[in-house]
Amino acid sequence: MVPLSNVRFDVMRTRAPSGNTSAHVPVPHLQGVTGSVDEIDSADAPMLGRVGFAEYKIDVDAGVDIATGDSVTNMVHIASGALWPSDAPRHVWRVVSQRESAPGPPAHRVVYIAR
């Protein structure tokens, strides 16, 4: 588990069209993922220069299957049980990039999200 996890959330992944539909449909992929959400800071600038705009980053356990293009939903602040953020509690966040941390403990994955 990521030290100081402060949120729990679900992940939706878009599946390719099948059958009679041409629509890409988001389906549940992961539920109850825990992580530590924080605002983007200057240390993230080199990564964000390549991926575009992100508002927040979430540190999750290494190897968690979250991919660029996934959606983060139902984010809840663990300590209070309140939906997060309070100004847009039912918002769906788009994963704009993700990467594994540098080798060594504590290993984790950094997920960059935007509205």
Image (cartoon, grey):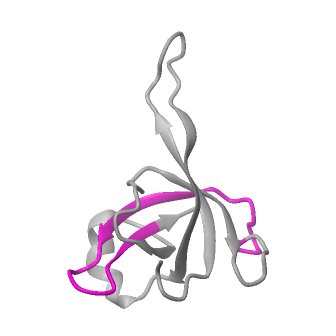
Q: Residue at x 35, y 70 (%)?
A: 62
Q: Residue at x 38, y 73 (%)?
A: 110
Q: Is residue 22 left or right of residue 74?
A: left
Residue 56 versus residue 67: which sits nearer the camera? 67
Q: Which residues are magenta?
A: 84-112
Q: Is residue 45 above or below residue 63?
A: below
Taking the view exactly as shown, the residue that stands out farthest to the left is 103
Query: Is residue 106 part of the magenta span, yes or no?
Result: yes
Residue 38 versus residue 65: which sits nearer the camera? 65
| Quarter that holds the C terminus | bottom right
Q: Is residue 115 left or right of residue 68?
A: right
Residue 7 versus residue 113: which sits nearer the camera? 7
Q: Position of residue 102 (x, y in %)?
A: 23, 81
Residue 41 versus residue 20: which sits nearer the camera? 20
Q: Position of residue 69 (x, y in %)?
A: 43, 50
Q: Position of residue 72 (x, y in %)?
A: 56, 58
Q: Residue at x 50, y 19 (%)?
A: 22
Q: Position of residue 17 (x, y in %)?
A: 47, 22
